[in-house]
Amino acid sequence: MLYFGGSPSVAALEMGHYLVSPWHVPKGYALGVFEVPHSVVELDMDDKPEDWKAFPYPRATQRLGDAWLERGQELVLLVPSCAVPAGLERIAVVNPLHSKSQAIELLDVVTPIFNERLFTGI
């Protein structure tokens, strides 16, 4: 599975879930800007389990993703970001085995990914 932030800021916040500190961002990290074909479905927010933000990931949430994968119809599933309160932002879950995955195009690579002023108070 591939995960894309719906925006650069969401991608940065999502990455923050996996790092002990912003100072642990590897020097070589870059922000990729991609164009994704229109084979996208969005998870209906009414369908998400109540504990969708929990960690470790709840089995009910995993079953939603499994069902989407088994259908194999869409390249991308848009789901709420756990990094942003109330699921106000989205991340894109991409099936790399989908027949249209080769159509994803890298448009740009941006580095550094953070403005150095961001962590001056830490």
Image: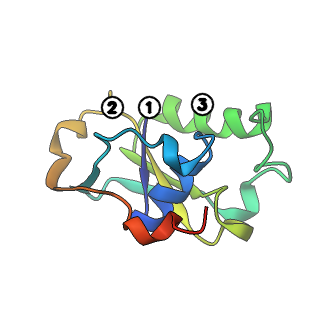
Choose between 121 and 16: the one closer to the eye.
121
Whether residue 52 is situated above or below residue 102 in the rendered picture: below
Report the amino acid beneath label 1: Met
Disc 2 element: loop
What mark, if any, has residue 1 been given in the picture? Answer: 1
Residue at (72% x, 68% y) in the render:
85
User: What residue is shown at x 45% (from left), y 56% (from top)?
Assistant: 11
Residue type beneath disc 3: Asp
Instruction: Find the distance from the CA under tag 3 to the CA under tag 1.
Output: 11 Å
Q: Position of residue 19 (x, y in %)?
A: 58, 41
Q: Residue furthest right?
A: 50
Reading the chain from its start, which is encountered first: label 3 or label 2?
A: 3
Residue highlighted by disc 2: 96
Amino acid on which the number 2 mark rests in the picture: Pro
Image-quadrant location for residue 60: top right
Q: CA distance from mark 1 to mark 2?
A: 6 Å
Which corner quadrant holds the N terminus? Answer: top left
Q: Secondary structure at mark 3?
A: helix
On the image, the x and y values in percent for residue 36 come to 26, 55
Asked whether the residues under the numbered discs 1 and 2 touch, taking CB atoms below 8 Å apart as contact, a structural biologist would say yes
Q: Earlier in the sequence, mark 3 or mark 1?
A: 1
User: At 28% across and 56% down in the image, what residue appears?
Assistant: 112
Q: Is residue 9 visible?
A: yes
